[in-house]
Amino acid sequence: MEMESMSLSNAAGIGLRLPHILEVAATRPHVGWLEIHPENFLANPHAAELLCELSEHYPVSFHTVGISIGSASGIDNNHLKRIRNLVQRINPVFVSGHLAWSTFKHEYLNDLLPLPYNAEALQLVEAHLHKVQDNLGRSYLIENPSSYIGFTTSTMSEVEFLSELVRRTGCSLLCDVSNIHVSAQNMGFDAHTYIDDLPSNAISELHLGGYTPEEGLLIDTHAAPISKDAWDLYAYAVRRFGPKPTLIEWDNDIPPLTTLLAEAKHAEHIAVEASLKEVRVVSH
């Protein structure tokens, strides 16, 4: 399956995690594209070699987990340089990261922590985004987080914050549909209105992942099948934004590769059906 024969516009991909990399390299399954966390490959030369080989046959996307775009202590220049070197080696179709922070000084935290949505945080993230994009020489996609708390110091909504980042930096957005559902349930807002208010021309990619109910909250664990509510919201997002490259995420309790491939195929089916419904609505 050569890259030239595939279009990403309506293709679904899978998160390629290390437990599956040998199987994917050996079997070359039919799937639209692959997403990796580059941090898993920086100190693993064998995995990096396999990734280089796979990048000749599949579009590859980088989803960073260590850039920490919202960190008050700034971007780790050494880490950014390592990411840039791998970007130059693989030439991924997208490089993305989270609207969150995960570092303090030189300490890395195994979590994606929230930001207040106010002018001070916006100025900080804007400056970091310019630095990341200038260093990588490309647009950096920002993903909406899964939320469990809010800040009394916030002066704007999450959508307003993201929209202003797009306006100020020219970044693109990675719309995590499952995160919207999780946050809407946890924070009490309407998920469809959230999608309606996003700047549609900035959406470059969609994500879907499983969540786990826990003590009255939905937790974005990426450890379960995608729920019907998330699939329904995904169909709505496709009708709103048009077909977009869609990624199936599964990072914990990772199932057999066939399960991920089946969910990717299901995402493509839903996207086609949703696009047809959109065409019928427009034609009327």
Image (cartoon, rainbow, N blue to C red):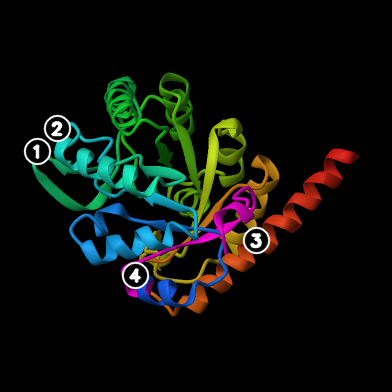
* Residue that badge 1 annotates: 105
Secondary structure beneath dot 1 equals: loop
* Residue 218 horizontal/vertical position (percent): 42, 60
Are dots 2 and 1 in contact, CB under 8 Å? yes
Residue numbers of the magenta segment: 1-20
* Residue 73 horizontal/vertical position (percent): 14, 32
Q: Residues within 10 Å of mark 1 (few under 14, many from 20)?
A: few
- Quarter that holds the N terminus: bottom right
**Sequence-earlier tag: 2 or 3:** 2
**Sequence-earlier tag: 2 or 4:** 2
Of residues 216 and 167, which is closer to you in this image? 167
Give me the residue at 28% from left, 65% from top: 47
Give me the residue at 75% from left, 50% from top: 275
Between the residue at mark 1 and the residue at mark 4, the CA separation in whole angstroms equals 28 Å
Are dots 2 and 3 in contact, CB under 8 Å? no
The numbered mark at residue 252 is 4
Frontmost of labels 4 and 3 is 3
**Sequence-earlier tag: 4 or 3:** 4
Q: Residues within 10 Å of mark 3 (few under 14, many from 20)?
A: many
The numbered mark at residue 73 is 2
* Residue that badge 3 annotates: 268
Of residues 176 and 6, which is closer to you in this image? 6
Give me the residue at 45% from left, 49% from top: 183
